[in-house]
Image (cartoon, rainbow, N blue to C red):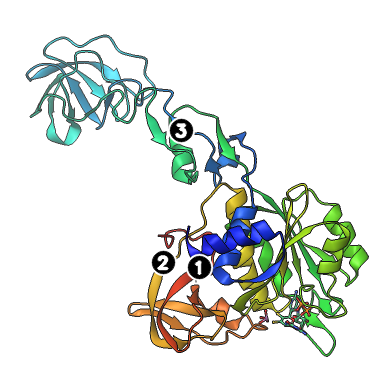
């Protein structure tokens, strides 16, 4: 058991909320989420989900030997006499005899007895006689060369990409057994928030509500319409109790001021508070709670960059768990010029890629999104006494997967 796994097990045993290290919080959020029950979904809905059962070929692909080039299906040695034309949609033709050829298009089934397909550009044609160089088997796609019935093509847990969707269609499948995408509801609190025009004294333009739906979708979940709530415990209780979404994000109620009602609302609904603060900057006052029915609540701090770090930390970890996916392991990169560590908290520093490593872009204060908007990732800077010259990378875009190692 790693140190982080030990800490997660300790929190689960204690059933007590605590402020946790960034890594432990992420792992606990992931472990808290049980994968949703598998469903058979049409291919268009299954894309972006993970396979619940292995994809096993039900078919021979291709089902018959097919031409791989536009040209002539020939038998034996040339020259050959043309006896007909075969298109991709043609019915299976009569077998060829020695010295015969069909004009054929790519993808058409070759007649029985075909020795090879001779591409047009290598052929000479005189009236109904065709000639040219061939080698046996050339330019024929053999039946079953992609797969045969019963072959394992993709293991359970594979992400259905558009490519896998196309493969499933090739196999003749209309549905796939997948773990469905979790539904996520974002509740934005704050009496001071406005949704049009600029901020002004006493009015702050909502910056979290606009960014969450796309972040949720990119993380592989389905976003409900964002709901804006007044700062009241009753409004929060009603909204939390009244949704079937598996994940509820609540922004702007996570600290302990007079307008911060999240903990009170969770308490009155009997939710179990599992994480109460994470040792990271920004994003310290994030929270994680679970209802008896398994629904998970993630508390996002009101400062916009802190809300973003909390979503990418706890929100994405929960979504990965519900989707039946592993927590992303993060790639490591050199930080050009180094970056100061915080003595006790993980720093999340907006950075951009460069050929030499990642470069901090600045403007990473918790109330501003300027740095994040210009960045590719957060550098995850572990706590320490001095400066870090390398850091793990948490992608700004939770749909970016190649960085997982
Ligand atoms: N006594 C303490 N006070 C605070 C603590 C603490 O630990 N003890 N933590 C600070 C940190 S760090 C953060 S982050 C904030 C989080 O507070 P809340 O989650 O309760 O959020 P609010 O107080 O409502 O808002 C904080 C700040 O962000 C603005 N805001 C809120 N929502 C939005 C939004 N959707 N779009 C743009 N800006 C938003 C809000 O107007 C405030 O300026 O607490 C600190 N305090
Ligand atoms: O840590 Mo707060 O979440 O920095 O703004």
Q: Is residue 234 left or right of residue 78?
A: right
For the question of whether residue 336 can be seen, the reply is yes
Mark 3 vs 1, N-terminal side: 3
Category of crowding for the residue at label 1, using alpha-carbon neighbours closer than 10 angstroms: few (below 14), some (14–19), many (at least 20):
many
Quarter of the picture for ligand 2?
bottom right
C-alpha gap between disc 3 and disc 2: 29 Å
Label 2 sits on a secondary structure element that is: loop
Residue of label 3: 55
C-alpha gap between disc 3 and disc 1: 29 Å
Ligand 2 contact, mark 1 (Cβ < 8 Å): no
C-alpha gap between disc 2 and disc 1: 10 Å
Q: Quadrant of the C terminus?
A: bottom left
Q: Is residue 305 above or below residue 59?
A: below
Mark 2 vs 1, N-terminal side: 2
The numbered disc on residue 395 is 1
Residue 382, x across and y down, in percent = 49, 78
Indicate which label's residue lies in the foreground, 2 or 1: 2
Residue of label 2: 331
Q: Is residue 258 left or right of residue 300?
A: right
Category of crowding for the residue at label 2, using alpha-carbon neighbours closer than 10 angstroms: few (below 14), some (14–19), many (at least 20):
some
In the rendered image, which quarter is residue 330 located in? bottom left
In the rendered image, which quarter is residue 311 located in? bottom right
Mark 3 vs 2, N-terminal side: 3
The numbered disc on residue 80 is none
For the question of whether residue 217 can be seen, the reply is no
Determine the residue positioned at 57% across, 80% down.
345
Q: Is residue 394 left or right of residue 271?
A: left
In the rendered image, which quarter is residue 338 located in? bottom left
- Residue at the right extreme of this rendering: 234
Indicate which label's residue lies in the foreground, 3 or 2: 2
């Amino acid at each position: 058991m790693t140190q982080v796994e030990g800490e997660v097990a300790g929190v689960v045993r204690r059933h007590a909320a605590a402020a946790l290290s960034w890594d432990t919080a992420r792992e606990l959020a992931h472990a808290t989420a049980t994968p949703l029950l598998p469903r058979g979904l049409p291919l268009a809905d299954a894309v972006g989900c993970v396979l619940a059962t292995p994809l096993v070929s039900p078919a021979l692909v291709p089902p018959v030997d097919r031409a791989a080039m536009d040209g002539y299906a020939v038998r034996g040695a040339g020259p050959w006499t043309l006896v007909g034309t075969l298109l991709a949609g043609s019915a299976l033709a009569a077998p060829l005899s020695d010295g015969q050829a069909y004009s054929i298009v790519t993808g058409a089934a070759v007649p029985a007895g075909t020795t090879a397909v001779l591409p047009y550009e290598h052929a000479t044609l005189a009236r109904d006689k065709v000639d040219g160089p061939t080698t046996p088997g050339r330019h024929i796609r053999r039946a079953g060369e992609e797969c045969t019935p019963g072959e394992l093509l993709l293991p359970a847990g594979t992400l259905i990409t558009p490519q896998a969707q196309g493969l499933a269609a090739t196999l003749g499948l209309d549905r796939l057994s997948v773990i469905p995408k979790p539904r996520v509801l974002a509740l934005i609190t704050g009496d001071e928030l406005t949704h049009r025009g600029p901020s002004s004294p006493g009015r702050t333009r909502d910056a979290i509500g606009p960014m969450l739906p796309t972040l949720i979708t990119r993380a592989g979940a389905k976003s409900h319409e964002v709901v804006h709530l007044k700062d009241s415990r009753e409004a929060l209780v009603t909204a939390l109790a009244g949704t079937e979404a598996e994940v509820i994000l609540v922004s702007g109620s996570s600290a302990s001021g007079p307008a911060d009602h999240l903990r009170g609302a969770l308490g009155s609904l009997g939710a179990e508070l599992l994480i109460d603060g994470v040792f990271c900057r920004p994003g310290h006052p994030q929270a994680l709670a679970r209802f008896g029915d398994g629904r998970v609540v993630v508390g996002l701090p009101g400062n916009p960059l802190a809300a973003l770090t909390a979503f990418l930390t706890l929100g994405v970890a929960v979504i990965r768990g519900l989707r039946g996916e592993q927590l992303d392991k993060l790639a490591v990169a050199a930080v050009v010029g180094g970056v100061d560590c915080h003595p006790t908290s993980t720093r999340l520093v907006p950075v951009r890629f460069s050929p030499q490593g990642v470069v901090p872009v600045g403007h990473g204060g918790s109330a501003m999104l300027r740095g994040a908007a210009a960045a590719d990732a957060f550098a995850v800077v572990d706590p320490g006494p001095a400066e870090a010259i390398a850091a793990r990378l948490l992608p700004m875009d939770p749909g970016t997967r190649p960085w997982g190692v």
